[in-house]
Structures are given as C-alpha cells and as structure tokens.
Image: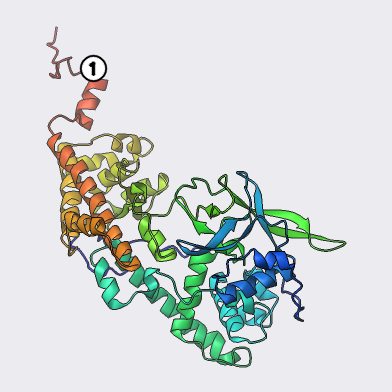
Amino acid sequence: MASVFSLPSSSFLCPLKTKRFRTTFQSLHSSPKPFLINSLQLKELDPNIPEPVQTFWKWLCDEGVVSAKTPVKPGIVPEGLGLVAKRDIAKGETVLEVPRRFWINPDAVADTEIGNVCTGLKPWISVALFLLREKWRDDSKWKYYMAVLPESTDSTIYWSEEELSEIQGTQLLSTTLSVKDYVQNEFQKVEEEVILPNKQLFPFPITLDDFFWAFGMLRSRAFSRLRNQNLILVPFADLTNHNARVTTEDHAHEVRGPAGLFSWDLLFSLRSPLKLKAGDQLFIQYDLNKSNADMALDYGFIEPSTSARDAFTLTLEISESDDFYEDKLDIAESNGLGETAYFDIKLGQSLPPFLIPYLRLVALSGTDAFLLESIFRNAVWGHLELPVSRANEELICKVIRDACKSALSAYHTTIEEDEKLMEEGNLSSRLQIAVGIRAGEKKVLQQIDDIFRERELELDELEYYQERRLKDLGLVGEQGDIIFWEPK
C-alpha cells in the first residue's frame, strides 16, 4: 500500500506511515399504506425533531416496527439525533425489534430489479448501488429512511485538503488516502461494467461523490456482528449512538419472531447494555477493538479520553533480498505470521507478544543464522522469545528507535502543542479529531521509543543464547564464569 510520507526503512521494517485497510463489511410491500398512528405516539416526539425524522417515525409506526410499547423514541441529544428512553429500562431489556423485511443487506438487493446485475459484485458495492437507486427514486419504499440519512459525517474520507493537512504525518492520513483511492478504483470499475451498460436500471447520474456517500453510510451505520450477516443496515436501530461507557458488544441479536399470522421470520433485536432512566439516551458499543484512527475513518469521531484507543501499527517484513528469506518465511508461517506482519501497539499497554520474536527473526544474520538450520526448526521460536545475541538485540533496538524518530519528525506539531490546543477547547469537530489523532499517535511512538531505549541500556545485562546454552550443558558457574575441567 502506498505511503504518503514515506520513511527510510531497513530491509525488514516497512514505512511506519502505512496502516492496514480492511474492507470488511425482503423487500417491503409495494403499495404505500396510509399512516395509522396513535396520536399519543406523535405527541411523545420532541417538536424540535426535524420533520424528516418525524415522518420516518410515522412510517415505522404504520409498518408495525414501532408500537406504544416500544420503550425508546428519537430525541435531540448532544450527538445531534439519538434514541432516548420513554420510561425506565432495565439492563439487557429488549428495546427494539426490526423484522427482516426492513433490513438492507445483499440478500435484500438480490430480491430487487438490480439483483441480477449485482450478482458477483462485492457485497458493499451491491448495497451501495441499492442505496443510490432508492435515494433517487421518488416512489421508493425506503424514501422515509433515505430522508433521514445524513449527507456526510465527520469521517476523514469527506475532509477537504485543508482539513487533511491537519493530520499530516499520521497513519490516519495515509489510510484515508488509500481508502479514497480504493473507493475511486471500485467506482470506475462498477461504472464501466454495471452502471453504464444498464442505464434502464440506473437512469440517473451516479458520480464519485455519490459513491463516496454510500460507502460512508455503510462504514458508519452497518451492523456487522450478527450471525450470518456480514453487512446489514437496520433502519431505526442505526439511530443508536456510541458511548465508551458501554464495554460489551453483546447487544444485537437475530431472533425468531412473528412475521405474520401463520409465519415466523427473523427479527433484529437490540437490547440495552445499560440500565436507563426515563429520558436517558440509549447507547451501544460500536467496536471495542477499533483504534481512534479507525473510529475517525469509519464514524467521524474519536474517544480522546480513552488512551487504549490511541494506537500505532508497526509493519514489519522479511525482505525477499534477505539471504535467508525462505528459511525465515517458513519459520514465520509456522507460527501464524507471514512475510509481512502487522503489530498494533496501544498506549499504556505492553508490546504484542509476537513482536519481539518476529523482530529477532528478521534481524538474524551472520553467526546467529545457525538458528535457522533445520535441526532447530521445531524449537527456534522458543529461542527467539529470548535474546539471541547482543548484535541482534542491538540491531532491533536501533532500527525501531530510528524509525520512531523519523516518524515523529513528520508531524507538524509537538505533543505539547496538541495538548495545549485541546485544553483551550473551541475546536471544530474535525480539528478536534485531527489534534486527538496526531497527539495519540505521537504518544504511542514515544512509548515505543522509550521501551527500546530502555532495552538498549540493558544490553550488557541480558543473557543471550550462547550463555543459556552453556548453562544447560553445565559449563557456566554460579558467577557466570566458564568452567574448565583439567584432564585426570
């Protein structure tokens, strides 16, 4: 993956700016019904709620998704719009259920007019085309849902060049630009292979900006942790906001429920992960494993007070020009790694357990290369979990520290300057994201540098392979001196 601000690297440390980008991601009735809404349900809504949201709520009521017993409703909240409790809600109580016929996923697309031309496309692309088509159609069965979808979020994919300049030097910038290149390339292919040849199905212009809008909606609103569901939009449920106070993701479920008089169908069931009082906002946890950079890219916000969200990814690789490339690759693959390995390092947490052994492996050279011989193959990883030699340990310290210093030099502000900006406040939402991301990355880089600086200071005190081997053979005394036997 291309790096925006490339760094000089050794033969085994990839440029630190490159961040992985993972692309992991029943029709309704055809004739509209009149709205049959209980007047009390209408009065429950805050009159300040935008009209499209009120109309959307009426639609949900008319379709039977919402009833008088539904314990949550749309409300004006600090995040803008969310779901609030109408009454006290117990922890783990079901707060909403949405029938499968309202889900938007690849299966739903397959049942529409564009289903045939979407066969074989990436799931997210087929759903993106579906969203764009339904957004354009005046007679869409989903028009009330489409009307409440935002035109954009604060995701970095929507930032201007000036705004992106505020994350200069960060992995988030290189990831964002890589994602934008990816989406643009996918759009060019789908435009040529699907959209233009099927103008009767897409009789409206679809621009790259439109495609980015659909991509952003899917990244920010799709549920992906349901059984057998890799990508699913659930109208109503996706009004729920994220909060760091929620420390579990076990709140969304597929359950069997009544779909009609004589049949049962799947329901999307959402439970409250917290105990709520009437008027409290319903929160869920979007993803416990995402870093702040991931959150900024996908959702358009970060958790500046959660240090575990601050992360930096070290990308290491075994160079094909390495004299021992095949042997090293075989050892790496035998231990669940590969030619390239990614290690996410989080602020305030220890290094990933396989990072140091992998570093020692790719740095093996000279007299240390005897560990690569086949007789050591089954035990070599155990040897790599401990210092191999002073030269090997010194090399990995130097390479990592040099890379950290180079990466830190690419930022246009210091940690102290960023912290001062955050203390002063009055930052726009996007600038707050930028400052938080670059400060967090720099803190993690400083942490990595400190770890390897301390390791450098301990090089003379560490016990290396040869010393351990002599001890195993009983050839080293208690004081570390080598024992010699005089012949009798």
Q: Is residue 392 among the parts visible in the rendering?
A: no
Q: Does residue 90 appear left or right of residue 414 in this picture?
A: right
Residue 141 in the figure: left or right of residue 368: right
Q: Quadrant of the C terminus?
A: top left
Q: Quadrant of the N terminus?
A: bottom left
In percent of width and height, residue 400 lies at 20, 50
Viewer can see residue 31: yes
Q: Can you identify the residue that label 1 sits on? A: 474
Specify few, some or many for label 1: CA neighbours under 10 Å numbering under 14, 14-19, or 20 or more. few
Helix, strand or loop at mark 1 = loop
Q: Residue furthest top?
A: 488
Kind of residue indicated by mark 1:
Gly
Give the x, y percent position of residue 193.
53, 86
**Residue depicted at 27% across the width and 39% down the height:** 371
Q: Position of residue 169 (x, y in %)?
A: 23, 64
Rendered location of residue 147, percent (x, y): 57, 78
Query: At x 42% / y 47%, what residue is drawn?
Result: 336
Look at the picture and state if 470 lies above or below 343. above
- 236 sits to left or right of 381: right
Nearer to us in this view, 188 or 163: 163
Q: Nearer the viewer, residue 337 or 345?
A: 345
Identify the image's colour scheme: rainbow, by chain, secondary structure or one colour. rainbow
